[in-house]
Image (tube, grey):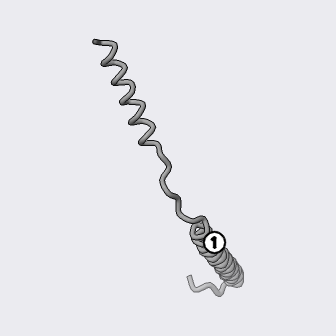
Amino acid sequence: MRKSILVLATAFTLSAFFTSCRDTAKESDDMEMSDDMDDMDDVDNDLEEAADDTGDAIKNAANETGDAVDNAANEVGDELDGTDDN
């Protein structure tokens, strides 16, 4: 009796396992490829915009650094000439 119950339990387990692992119908690959291409175009645009923003930030930082150096040089020159307001 015990052996027959174990055989039935094993058969039920195996049948449940194999029926739950069936493949489902797949969507067409054409649609997936089209979506992937759109995503790649978006990534390309995002990367280009990020590179442009980075370039602008570097230019602005270089200009501000140059202005700070010029102002410091003028302050030192004024200090040496004795025409500093402070």
Q: Nearer the viewer, residue 73 or 6?
A: 6
72 to the left or right of 15 = right
Residue 12 screen position, x and y as percent: 36, 30
In this rendering, position of residue 42 left or right of residue 8? right
Q: Is residue 23 above or below residue 4?
A: below
Q: Residue at x 66, y 79 (%)?
A: 52
Question: Between 76 and 48, which is closer to the camera in this rendering?
Answer: 48
**Residue 62 at x, y = what percent?**
69, 77
The residue located at (42%, 42%) in the rendering is 20
Amino acid type of disc 1? Answer: Met
Placement of 85 over or under 20, stated as above or below? below
- Number of numbered discs: 1
Q: Position of residue 28 (x, y in %)?
A: 57, 65
Q: Which residue is mark 1?
A: 37
Left-right relation of 34 to 1: right
Picture quadrant where residue 34 is located: bottom right
Q: Which quadrant holds the C terminus? A: bottom right
Residue 76 in view: no
Is residue 18 at least partly visible in the picture?
A: yes
Q: Residue furthest left?
A: 1
SS at mark 1 in the image: helix
Q: Crowding near pointer 1: few (<14 within 10 Å), some, many (20+)?
A: few
Name the quadrant containing residue 53. bottom right
Image quadrant where one finds the N terminus:
top left
In terms of depth relative to the viewer, which is nearer, 62 or 49? 49
Q: Position of residue 24 (x, y in %)?
A: 48, 53
